[in-house]
Amino acid sequence: MLKKLAPSILDIDFTCLERELRKIESGGADLLHLDIMDGNFVPNISFGPRIVESIKNITSLPLEVHLMVEKPENHIKSFINAGGDIIIVHYETSKHLDRLIQIINEANVKSGIALNPATTLSVIEYLINKIDLLLLMTVNPGFGGQKFIPEMITKIEKARKIIDNQKKSISLEVDGGINLDNISEVIKAGAEIIVVGQIIFKSANPEMTIKKIKNIMNK
Ligand code: DX5
Ligand code: ZN
């Protein structure tokens, strides 16, 4: 299964967004990971639908919207209208997750559920066949540049087994603290879409870094 790289633009230089996006595109990114933070569900505040719309207008890469917000039901429509191709909601932010996923699926965009490190896989048992993507957080959400939580390797392996037993094709994505030293282990555990943020945007040459990551991913 071809692995995909989704750079998180949380730490991109927003003063030259287009120039930076061109580097990501030429490096070979497969999709863009947009971290939406509300300062409530997570301590940080990032950006909203207006920025997503501007990004949609300057790239043809698919946009995955990682909603780290309380009451995601109040925001889904605006991120879909802004051009989100995949809408990922956190299990921890909704009492009516099945209804949330239904709303996303009915809008004809892809749906995903994100789980925080301490949330067990069992919570998605009755929903797994309704989503297109399962996102496992490998850091506690809120910031880029954090350390990968090693216990998440077994969680990725368990999620891989659950997904492989489903009829529907569901992507397994991991997010947080992934770097050149741990990416092979994460892929071996069964991840197929990898989110990478700071090691790309803090590097002197983001395009080269993306190419390096993609080489390791698809070895
Ligand atoms: C954290 C975000 C991640 C993060 C990834 O809450 O969901 O997408 O930006 O960045 P790195 O790769 O720097 O951990
Ligand atoms: Zn994210």
Image (tube, grey):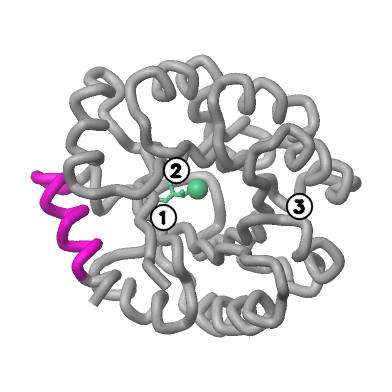
The percent coordinates of residue 145 (x first, y second) are 35, 52
Residue drawn where x is 51% and y is 65% of the image: 138
Q: Nearer the viewer, residue 196 or 101?
A: 101
Find out if the beta carbon at label 1 lies less than 8 Å from the nearest ligand 1 atom: yes
Rendered-image quadrant of the C terminus: bottom left
Image height check: is 191 above or below 174?
A: below
Q: Nearer the viewer, residue 178 or 2?
A: 2
Q: Nearer the viewer, mark 1 or mark 3?
A: 1
The percent coordinates of residue 24 (x first, y second) are 24, 40
State yes or no: residue 205 in magenta.
yes
- Mark 1 or mark 3, which has the lower sequence index? 3
Structural distance between the alpha carbons of marks 2 and 1? 7 Å
Q: Which mark is residue 92?
A: 3
Q: Nearer the viewer, mark 2 or mark 3?
A: 2
Image height check: is 36 above or below 98?
A: above
Residue drawn where x is 69% and y is 67% of the image: 168
Q: Amino acid at mark 3?
A: Glu
- Mark 2 or mark 1, which has the lower sequence index? 2
Q: Is residue 22 left or right of residue 147?
A: left
Tag 1 residue:
195
State yes or no: residue 194 in magenta.
no
Residue drawn where x is 55% and y is 32% of the image: 84
